[in-house]
Every structure is written in structure tokens, then in C-alpha cells.
Image (cartoon, rainbow, N blue to C red):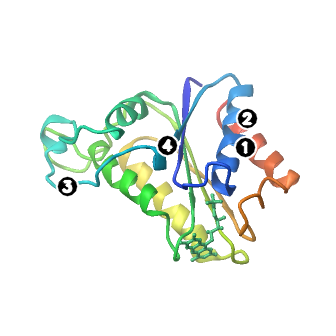
Amino acid sequence: MGKVIGIAGSARKEGNSATLMRMILKGAFQAGADTKEVYLNGLVFKGCQGCERCTSNGNCILNDDLTPILDELKKAEGWVLASPIYYDSITGQMKTFFDRCRTFTKDPKTQKLKPQLNGKRKGIVIVTYEDTPREDYYHEAEKLANYLGWMGDFGKVKIISEGNLGSKDAAAKKSDLLARAEKLGEDIFS
Ligand SMILES: Cc1cc2nc3c(=O)[nH]c(=O)nc-3n(C[C@H](O)[C@H](O)[C@H](O)COP(=O)(O)O)c2cc1C
């Protein structure tokens, strides 16, 4: 496995979703991958403008802090997306980032939907939340996982959907959960 990039959608760098993301990256690193952490909240970027010009030249017309990250994601063999659940959905930061990935979904020549990321890659989507385990929150992660398939050949994207994580340090206190995330990273990105 080459490069694995973790995208954190929470403003809480030491919070639950980012902690699990880092454990997955730790596992990936142990398996020999080169890893990178991206904290969306520290970047300045706009939402998709819906201009669809990414479909004619393969690039987004916007040029902001997300531009180099999208470039790196094109080459990365592993994507790890981590978001808390806010009002039954992913955070605004993660949604805004994900909309910008439109550029990876359409063939610039035919304007038809066709994954633009070359080669095989692997993906993991993490969602954390305060409530007791909920299927609809698993589904929020599954939605992102499915749309990754519009962008490239991610195979079966793994999902971590973890409830009972209200306080910022809740995940950090669960050694079994941390170990599970680390093992998943090691297994998937080996
Ligand atoms: C604005 C906001 C909305 C939230 N909405 C929900 C929700 O709808 N359901 C839920 O179970 N938890 C909700 N939570 C709790 C977070 O999902 C939970 O604390 C999560 O683990 C935070 O992840 P983080 O530590 O990575 O930021 C919300 C928290 C905030 C700040």
C-alpha cells in the first residue's frame, strides 16, 4: 500500500472521530503505508459551485486550500473519512469536502458518470455519535462509502459506526475500540 490519507471532519482534533482516524492510520503505517492526516476545519475552502466545469477539464475551477488535497487524494491508494454525526448527518465540513469530490465522478469527455480515479484503492468511513447504536447513523456512513464507488474502484469500503461517544475523550478511553480501529487499519492497508 502506498499513501493513505485520513480526512477529519470534526473541529475537535482530539475528539472521537479523529482519534479513531489516527488509530487506523497508525495501523496502516505499521502495515507499511505512508500516511497523512488532513483536518478540514483548519482549511479555508468553498463548497462545490455546481458549475460542472470539472467535467470538461477534469479539474475543479476553485483554487483554495482543498486544491492540493484533492490532488493528493487522486494518487492516494487509501482514503479514511472520519466525521461525527451532527443532527443525524455528517458535519458541514465533511459534506462540503465530499461535494468537491464531484470532480472524481464524471468523464470529462462524455460528461457521463464514470469513476475518474485510476486503479484500485481502499476506503474506510468512520462516524461517531452520542446516542446508543443506531442503524440510520450506520447508513450515513454507508452513503459516503457508496459514493466512493462513483469515484473509483474502492472495493468493499469498511465502516466504523460507533455510538455512546458523547464527550470528546470517550473514544480515547475505550482501549478495545482503539485496538479494533488500529487492527482494521493494519488489515485493510497491508
Ligand atoms: C452540533 C452537534 C450536533 C450533534 N448531533 C448529534 C446527533 O444528531 N446524534 C447524536 O447521537 N449525537 C450528536 N452529537 C454528538 C456528537 O456526534 C458526538 O459527540 C461525536 O462523537 C463527536 O465527535 P468528535 O469528538 O469527533 O467531534 C452532536 C454534537 C454536536 C456538537
Name the residue beneath numbered marker 4: 154
Q: CA distance from mark 3 to mark 2?
A: 36 Å
The amino acid marked with disc number 3 is Gln
- Measured along the vertical axis of the image, is residue 22 above or below residue 145? above
Question: Where residue 166 sits in the image (x, y, percent)?
Answer: 71, 69
Mark 4 or 1, nearer chain start: 4
Q: CA distance from mark 2 to mark 4?
A: 19 Å
Q: Is residue 176 left or right of residue 35?
A: right
Name the residue beneath numbered marker 2: 27
Mark 3 or 2, nearer chain start: 2
What is the crowding at mark 3: few (fewer than 14 residues within 10 Å), some, or many (at least 20)?
few
What is the crowding at mark 1: few (fewer than 14 residues within 10 Å), some, or many (at least 20)?
many
Name the residue beneath numbered marker 3: 49
The amino acid marked with disc number 2 is Gly
Residue found at the far right of this picture: 175
The amino acid marked with disc number 4 is Phe
Who's the residue at 73% across and 34% down the image?
27
Who's the residue at 52% across and 76% down the image?
87
